[in-house]
Each structure stands twice: as structure tokens, then as C-alpha cells.
Image (cartoon, helix red, strand yellow):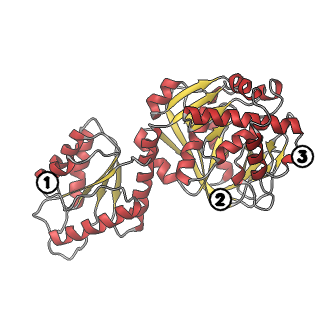
Amino acid sequence: MKSFSPVYIPVGVPTFHLESAQAQFDASVALLKSIDERFAVPDKMLLNLDDLRAYLDTLAPDLIVFQNLTFANAAYMSEVLRRFDCPMLLWTLREPVIDGGRLRLNSLTGAYSAANALRAFDDRSFEYLFGAPSEERSRETIEAVVKAAALKKGMRSLKMSAVGHTPQGFGFGRALDSELMNAFGVELEAIEARELIDKAKTYTDEEVAAYLEKTEQMTCGLDRTPEHNRIDHARLLKAYSDYVREHNIGALASRCWPDFFTAFGTPVCTVLSMLNDEGVAAACEADIYGALSMWIGMQLSGEPVFFGDPVSLDEGENTVTFWHCGAAACSLARRDTGAVVGVHPNRKIGPAMDFGCEAFPEATIFRIGREPDGFFRFFLTEGEALDKPKQFIGTSIVVKTDSPAREVVEKSVKDGFEPHFVVIKGRHAAALEALASMYGFEVCRY
């Protein structure tokens, strides 16, 4: 993410009202720098092709904000397209004065000219903004596009891991390494769950003491878990942590049942919880696209996200409850209970997380969906995470959706979405819609 390079390309011609153009240029630079200080900006307005070419020679953009300060013909956009292929935001300025006198900017006509060139140039996709630098909508749109472009850049350096295979009937979580690389630029490696289990079995109690202590510090009630399960949890946590660090893994999807109960005797749930708190997106049931959805949500919010199944609908409260067996990050727990440790709801073996999540006033529910034909789509809806206690054994979060909850559920079921979703703190639909557009994916907004 640190290497992300957004650039501002403000073009025009000197035959329009340059005082008005200069004011818009100065205000645009100030806005862009306030959004991301990494924005490259020229020293002056680019009012001829020679100045444009000289500026472009200095750039290696990951995002282009192309702005018509005044009208400029298609040659300006064509020069950019000839050199770069990266996400682009085409920004049209509002005409500053309408008084029956001179047309000061004519930015909108320039936008049509630029967009026509984009369409002609292998139908290049782009985002679009109409508005002055002073408008809040302009800030919101640019912020969303910057976040999306940074995510797209970041995914090209993301390395994921599939730890074991999905259980029977959970094939929706599987992914091919070539497919992930082709669609997202993400590298995927695979390791058998057995390999990490076997590694965990080799550690002594002394070697895992620090991992046990860390879990004790972050959770509540771990002492109620039998000692051999506590120690085996610490062994697993060290095995996963060492693997993630040594292989530079940013997100993983791990097999969980039945192997960790039958072959090891201790669940992996709390291990995944700890990894999520350390910034590694860790999904259970070997759901690769669930883990990638988690990683995207964590990049947008800067915090762990909730991963789970929609299990309950309440039309009276207009809520959907999301739940899973017990792998939620400790930091998501309600403050009045803390990150309580219990047992897996089906296997009755611990440690597994067992708490309700804290409330937050803005929430985004998201999922990367894979169609049977191999195309991708984004599930999106927004709302509020309510102040609710634990709903079932395991971890849960109750979201009041902006749209009618019954419609969200009924439509997404009929649309055939996968049963795992992530709940992200904050409203991020605009950035996710921009990201989908950059990839050419369908957005299913509920």
C-alpha cells in the first residue's frame, strides 16, 4: 500500500478564462492532497500537449484523476491512454458562473471528448465525477475511488493460503490459484491442515508458553478450558503464526471441522480469532473468497471484520443476525463481556470464542460471489450493528439493514449467493462499488 501512486492530470487550453481555471486548479490540488498526500500534482495547469507530455514523463501511476480545467480535445486523453493502463477517474468541473457572459471553463464538453476517447481506446473503463472541489460529494467520490484503486494495487502483492480443503458440500469456498491470480492478481498457495497439526504436535509446553499467555491476556474465561486443550491451542497458534510469518501470508482460509476435533482434539477457532486480531484475515471452513472478502474489509476499515452465516431474520426489528462457531476476533467482543471463551457449539470442545459483538453505528455487509460461469460479483448492503447480547453459542452480530431485511434475505437467497458474509465497521459501499467497476464485476446492491 505504501507504494501506491495516485496522480492528478489537469488539462485545458489557454483560450478560456484562466483566472477561473487557476482557482479550480488550486482548490483541486488542496482537496486531493487532503485525501491522500501521496498525490502527484503538476506545478502548473497543463494547457498544451508539450506540458502534458513533460509531466507524464515523470509519472508511474496506480490511479489517474484526469480533470478538464477547461475544454480540451481528445488528444490530451489519448496521450494519457497511450502511456498508462490503470484505474481512472474523469473529473468534470461545474461551470463557476452563469451570467449571460463568457463561458469560463467548458469543462463538461471536454469530459465528453475525453470519455469518447476512452470508449474508443479498447473501451477502457473509468469512474466519473461531476462537481466542484468545494462540494462534499466530490470529496466522497474521490475518497472512494482512491480507496478502491489502492485496494486493487494492494491485492497484486497479497499472498493467500488455503489450509486444507473445504468440507463436502462447501465447494463454494474453493478457488484455483490461476483464477485468483487472473481475476485479482492474488497469489494462492496451499498446505494440508495435517501438516500444521503435525507441526503443532512437535512443540514443547515451554515453546508455546508465550502463545498461551497472549491468548489468556486477550480472552476471558480461558481457565475454564481443560488444560490439555489450552496447551494444544497454543501449539496450534504457534504453528499457524510461524507459517504465516515465514510464508508472508496476508489472508488464509482454514479447514476446521472435522479434522481438528478428530485428529487433534482441539478446535482451530480461537487460533483464527487471534490471527484476525493480528491483521491476518482468517476464514474458517476453507472459504477462500470469504477470506479475500475479509481482507478487503480489513483494508477499508483498518480493523478486524466479522465473518459468518446469516442465521436469523427479524422483520419487526428489520435485522439479520450473522453467526459462526467461534472464530471472531477478540477485539469485536462487547465491552461488558469481553472476548469470552467457550466450547464449539456442536463438538462441545474448546477453546472457541463465545460472545456477542459490540455495536457500531455504521456497517457494511459484503461478499465476493463467484458465479457458476466463473464471473465474479459483489454483494453489498449497509446498515447498523445493534447493541445485542450473544444470540447463540458461538459468536454473533445483529445488523439492522437500511433496506427491508426480508427483501435483503429473500433476494440474495434467490440470487444464489454463498452463505458466508463479512460485516465491516463503517460505510464502504461506495469504495466497493468503485472497486467492482475497476474489475468489471457486477454489483448486487441490496
Q: Which residue is labeled 2 in the image?
A: 384
Instruction: State the residue at coordinates (62%, 57%).
Output: 383
The span from disc 3 to disc 1 (Cα, nearest Å) is 71 Å
- Amino acid type for the residue under numbered disc 3: Arg
Instruction: State the residue at coordinates (90%, 39%).
Output: 226
Task: Give the image location of residue 92, x and y in percent.
Answer: 28, 59
Disc 2 secondary structure class: strand
216 horizontally vs 418: left or right? right
The span from disc 2 to disc 3 (Cα, nearest Å) is 33 Å
Instruction: State the residue at coordinates (44%, 37%).
Output: 156
Mark 2 crowd level (few <14, some 14–19, many ≥20, 10 Å Cα): many
Contact (CB < 8 A) between labels 2 and 3? Answer: no
Q: Quadrant of residue 420?
A: top right
Q: Earlier in the sequence, mark 3 or mark 1?
A: 1
Say if residue 289 shows up in the picture: no
Mark 1 crowd level (few <14, some 14–19, many ≥20, 10 Å Cα): some
Q: Quadrant of residue 292?
A: top right
Question: Is the residue 264 above or below the residue 80 in the image?
Answer: above
Q: Which residue is labeled 3 in the image?
A: 224
